[in-house]
Image (cartoon, rainbow, N blue to C red):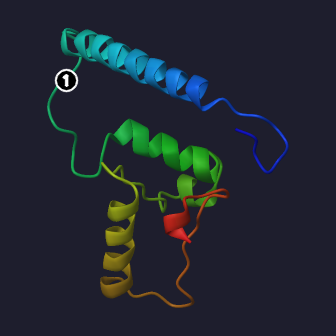
Amino acid sequence: MTTNHGFSLSLRVCVSLRLHYALDSITLSSQATRILLNDPNLDHEYLPITGLPEFTAGAAKLILGASSPAVEEGRAVSVQTISGTGANHLGALFLSRFYHWDGPKQIYLSNPTWGEFT
């Protein structure tokens, strides 16, 4: 198959690579699951409702910077969600309806971001 961009593409190779990748992914996933489930040092209980505290604190520092005034003053809040788009939408909807503040409402998106967010 020749694309509009002037290079050739073998669909047969792509399908073969895709199938091989899927099989490797299943194998690796099974191995990782087995390792994690058999590790006696890991807690297999549910995380707190807002996520793993070390992860969310680290994410805030990574995104805002460890020396950010919001982080240093304890004004940065982070939550960990099981899914991105739906959970973020519900969180933003909740804040827009029940949290009142002075000034314009703002959200920050990474660049690039998912198409669903824009």
Tell which of 8 and 36 is nearer to you: 8
Tell which of 90 and 96 is nearer to you: 90
The disc labelled 1 sits on which kind of residue?
Asp
Q: Which residue lies at the image location 85% right of the left edge and 43% below the top edge? A: 6
The residue beneath circle 1 is: 43
Q: Which quadrant: the C terminus?
A: bottom right
Q: Residues within 10 Å of mark 1 (few under 14, many from 20)?
A: few
Is residue 38 positioned above or below 69 on the image? above
Instruction: Residue 77: give x, y in percent of width and height.
Output: 43, 59
Tally the marks: 1
In screen coordinates, is 14 left or right of 2? left
Instruction: Residue 78: give x, y in percent of width and height.
Output: 42, 55
- Mark 1 element type: loop
In screen coordinates, is 6 left or right of 47? right
Instruction: Residue 68: give x, y in percent of width and height.
Output: 64, 54
Tell which of 2 and 21 is nearer to you: 2
Instruction: Residue 102: give x, y in percent of width and height.
Output: 51, 90
Q: Residue furthest left?
A: 45
Q: Quadrant of residue 8?
A: top right
Q: Which residue lies at the image location 60% right of the left edge and 32% below the top edge? A: 11
Q: Which residue lies at the image location 34% right of the left edge and 52% below the top edge? A: 83
Is residue 80 positioned above or below 19 on the image? below
In screen coordinates, is 6 left or right of 1? right
Is residue 81 positioned above or below 89 on the image? above
